[in-house]
Amino acid sequence: MCIKTLDNTCPLCDAIDSLASQSMGEQRRAACERLNELGWPTRKNDAFRYCNLKPLSETSWHPAPSASPDAATLDALNIAGTGARLVFVNGRFDETASSTLPDQARLLAPMLNEMELDRVADFTNDPFAQLATALVEDGVVIEVPDGQELSEPIHIVHLSSGNDDPIASTLRIVIRLGRNAKACVLETWAGDGPTLVTPMTEVELGEGAHCDHARLVEHGDDVWHMGAIASKQAADSTFESVVLTVGGKTIRTLAHSSLDGEGAHAAVRGFGIGDDQRHMDSRLHVAHMAPNCTSREIFKHLLPDHSTAAFTARIYVNEGAHGTDAVQTSRNLLMSNTAKAWSRPELEIYADDVKCTHGATTGEIDPGGLFYLRARGVPEATARALLAWAFAAEVINEVPVADLRTHLARRILAQLPGAETLDEGVVSL
Amino acid sequence: MSLLEIKNLHASVDGIEILKGINLTIEPGQVHSIMGPNGSGKSTLARVISGEETYDVTEGSVLLGGKDLLDMDPEERAREGIFLAFQYPVEIPGVSTKYFLRTAVNSIRAHRGLDELDAYGFLKLVKEKAAWVELDPALLDRPVNEGFSGGEKKRAEIFQMAMLEPTMCILDETDSGLDIDALRIVADGVNQQRSPDRGFLVITHYQRLLEYIVPDVVHVLLDGRIVRSGGKEIALELEDKGYGWLEEEVAAGA
């Protein structure tokens, strides 16, 4: 089945077969069959036009072994101001490293058979979303009833660890907020070694609900992070999401956002720093299905070395979704002659009285800003780092949760080219 | 020794010559003004002295206290004592004015063999100098020049000048876009910084600024050359008659 077509001794397929005998049999097999039909994508597939998946398709992936996390590694990932920390290693819950589950959160593993997954967005054509379903063993389900609020942000950490063979794992995060409910959920993806992870987060917001969400990608250099985020919002709800990439080999973020109820607001932001050959691929789809919804998408990449970034985003405005206000921005800062960026904004509009704007820029450090700083005595290397920081800060400063903002800023500062010329004080806004 | 000594300076951009042989000497304590119509090369001169790389210097020399400036990067020139108050100060979102300025002050102090200012010393200096130009120190928590009004930007430039304590201050059309009150505040800020060992080069299009910052010498720049130098009465004459008559005179003399 599935990946066996590429490699006749596919250990991953055996694992999926064996999982299917335990839970979600039908759904796993369906996902596997679909994956088999799709195959590993090539550049001929428009959705992966800028993404070289050849090394991934030539790798023989194995199921992830059980492993224990390293305490120091985990603690380095902590985010100030968060409550419960739920740790998963290679797709499985690690009770020892985790805090007690908050009331509104449950583990997915015991509920795999009754939980309806993949109901937020249609990812039929995405092989990695199919793999996420075929391979899922555990995850977190956060359900906040009407009018309630998660008292503290939940931090979910996924660590890949202990692999000699290339391993594949996944984790499912399901967030369902009732009417006027509120939650803040932060994900960190980390770990080293040849790994394929397919993060999948599904968010459903009731009327007036508010969800703050962040996904931090902090993998080592040989990790394929092929993730997706699906959200579906009722009237007057708010979804504020940010994806930060400071690690990994290839990072794909597929984000589908459906604004189904009048007055809903979605903000999907991304910031990524390239490194060596890193490729960051963001594919966004925002559907304005109801009137008077607002959406903001801003993705920025800072690209040194041979790093690359692609941004493909579509705003879809349904018939009758008048009063739509959508802004889509893609900005890339090239820090070397060998870095590359592609931006493809797309608009599909079937309503009148809408405001949809998109802007895409790719450029180098602004010589005017550089001269201004240097003319005040700031050394060139510091001036460049300051301007790179300024480029990042514009996205980070929009993140509404203060502790998260500071955390993101520090993470960026740790990876920013030339950051050694700056000090902590730069994170002051 | 002269503070600033410019000899036969030629500079071009994209192969087009803008400065066609500038000679200018400024002694310590002096205020010189350069006036001239748009496109005469005033801003180019300011930027060439401060080291903007867009311009190619094809001939001539610029010395600051006897040191060859043309061989230095812009940051080295700033550390040696050059300060350019920009006509259009650049906005840098995401970087607080305070952080930027502390970095600048400390790079210059290090060059002068002084200790870095700690947070307390820096804030003390900020309060003192901000008062000179009636600048609200709260502005310093904002990103560099972002969301500043036109007047605030210019005042911030003069404030930065006060913080960096340069020896040679160049003001590039600092009066443009200022109303009369803002102009007076900016001029007061400049006048407070006049001292026997500091020189000023005030570039302006209009005579108005020179009523507040009274120059020792006024130069008229036309088509990349200084065509006339003299006392402040030249400024009044230009205000009265415009640049046309001088252009004709120069053309007739050529």
Image (cartoon, helix red, strand yellow):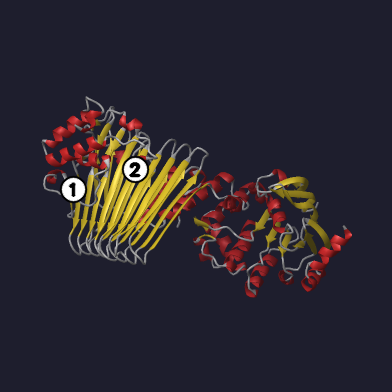
Q: Is residue A270 left or right of residue B20?
A: left
Q: Label 2, label 1: how many angstroms apart (C-alpha)? A: 23 Å
Q: Nearer the viewer, residue A318 or A335?
A: A318
Q: Secondary structure at mark 1?
A: loop
Q: Nearer the viewer, residue A347 or B4?
A: A347
* Residue A310: quadrant of the picture: top left
Q: Nearer the viewer, residue B178 or A24?
A: A24
Dot 2, crowdedness within 10 Å: few (<14), some or many (≥20)?
some
Give the percent coordinates (x, y) of residue A163: 27, 30
Residue under the point 42% across and 47% down: A412
Q: Is residue A327 above or below residue A132?
A: below
Q: Is residue A70 above or below residue B41?
A: above
Question: Which numbered tag is attached to residue A117?
Answer: 1
Contact between marks 2 and 1 (CB within 8 A): the answer is no
Give the percent coordinates (x, y) of residue B107: 60, 49
Residue under the point 73% across and 46% down: B57
Foreground: disc 2 or disc 1? 2
Give the percent coordinates (x, y) of residue B122: 55, 57
Question: Which numbered tag is attached to residue A236?
Answer: none
Q: Nearer the viewer, residue A137 or A408?
A: A137
Q: Is residue B137 above or below residue A365?
A: below
Which residue bears the numbered disc 2?
A: A47
Q: Amino acid at mark 2?
A: Ala
Dot 1, crowdedness within 10 Å: few (<14), some or many (≥20)?
some
Letter of the chain that mark 2 sits on in the rendering: A
